[in-house]
Structures are given as structure tokens and as C-alpha cells.
Image (cartoon, rainbow, N blue to C red):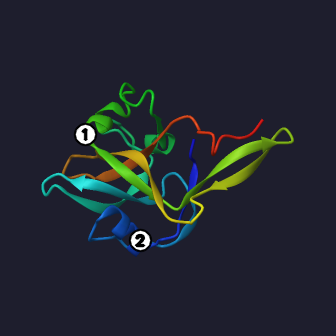
Amino acid sequence: MCGREIIKAKVHEYASMFDVLNVPDLIPNYNVAPTHMVPVVRMKAEEKTREMVLLKWGLIPSWAKDPAIGSRMINARADTVAEKPAFRHAFRRRRCLMLTDGFYEWQRTNGKRKQPYFIGMKDESPFAFAGLWERWGDDPFSEQIESCALITTDANDIVRPGP
């Protein structure tokens, strides 16, 4: 489960890697948390091209009464994403790539203490998580928020904690 990540703001690398022309202004952040704005690559449906935009991390379903629900919807499990009411509409229609330079996982040590471990590419290149995005507030007279969640699955042998 990913709850923190880093964005080094390698704008030209992101643009080249994901074949996008317009890249939003990015500021390096070594403690990106849920509810922060994160870079996402998605399809521009009307033009059938990719775009990079900043979305709020924490998916707010279109049917939500309160946008605060998004702070609890940061990750969607791959094995249930198609069925969960909060994610299934976005899974069918609004997929994206959430860009990152690495993320943190925590492991319990000495009972209650948690130790963070950084996980990233050996060559420090950026990569992407599979993700979903949604637009909340379709009323033209109210605030519109575009938000996202990343899709998680069980850890593989490379990142799984040892015995």
C-alpha cells in the first residue's frame, strides 16, 4: 500500500518517457502525501492524445456528497477495483498513469515503531503506477475537483519484506 512518494520534478524526462508535449509546473517534493497534487498522464478523449496534468491524490467518486472522502481513497486494490462502488466507474472510463520517482513503505520494528524504506529504480529514473481518475462536482456553478487513486497489488519478491 503506497501512502507516500517522491516527485523530483524531472519535467523533461517525464515528457519524453510518456510522450507528452505540455507539462505542468512541478516543484520537487520528497514527501508527497495523500491530498497533495500529483502528476498524472491520461488520454485527452477529444484529441486522442496524452496529456500530463496535476490531480489531487485521493479519488473523490462523482456521487460523493463530500469531497473529504477522497483522503481515504488513495489506493484501489487490483483484485477488487472493478467491483468497488468508489472505483468501478473510473476503472471502466478514466484510467491514468501516476508518475513518481519512488515511494516509501513502512515496516514495523520493535513492536510499535515503524521504519520507512524508500523504493525506487536503481538508475533513479521515474516510473508510473497504474491509476484511476475522476471528476467531482459536474455542476457548472460549483467547484470541480479532479482526483486520482493508484492501483495496488501484492508486493513482488523484489519489494516484499524478508522473513
**Position of residue 31 in the picture relative to residue 51 (left or right):** right
Quadrant of the image for the C terminus? top right
**Position of residue 130 in the picture relative to residue 117 (left or right):** left
Write down the quadrant of residue 62 in the picture.
top left
Q: CA distance from mark 2 to mark 1?
A: 27 Å
Task: Give the number of callouts.
Answer: 2
Amino acid on which disc 1 is placed = Arg
Instruction: State whether residue 36 is above or below residue 14.
Output: above
Q: Position of residue 97 (x, y in %)?
A: 38, 52
Q: Position of residue 35 (x, y in %)?
A: 48, 53
Quadrant of the image for the N terminus? top right
Q: Does any portion of residue 134 appear in the rendered image?
A: no
Q: Does any portion of residue 83 appear in the rendered image?
A: yes
Q: Callout 2 environment at 10 Å: few (<14), some (14 to 19), or many (20+)?
A: few
Residue extending farthest to the top is 83
Q: Earlier in the sequence, mark 2 or mark 1?
A: 2
Q: Which disc is residue 34 wearing?
A: none
Instruction: State whether residue 50 is above or below residue 11.
Output: above
Could you tell me which secondary element the residue under label 2 belongs to? helix
Q: Which residue is mark 2?
A: 13
Instruction: State whether residue 151 is above or below residue 118.
Output: above
- Residue displayed at 33% across by 52% down: 145
Amino acid on which disc 2 is placed = Glu
Q: Are marks 2 and 1 in contact (CB under 8 Å)?
A: no
Q: Position of residue 40 (x, y in %)?
A: 37, 57
Q: In front: 144, or 141?
A: 144
Write down the quadrant of residue 107 in the picture.
top right
Q: Which residue is mark 1?
A: 93
Could you tell me which secondary element the residue under label 1 belongs to? helix
Q: In front: 123, or 96?
A: 123
Q: Position of residue 81 (x, y in %)?
A: 40, 31
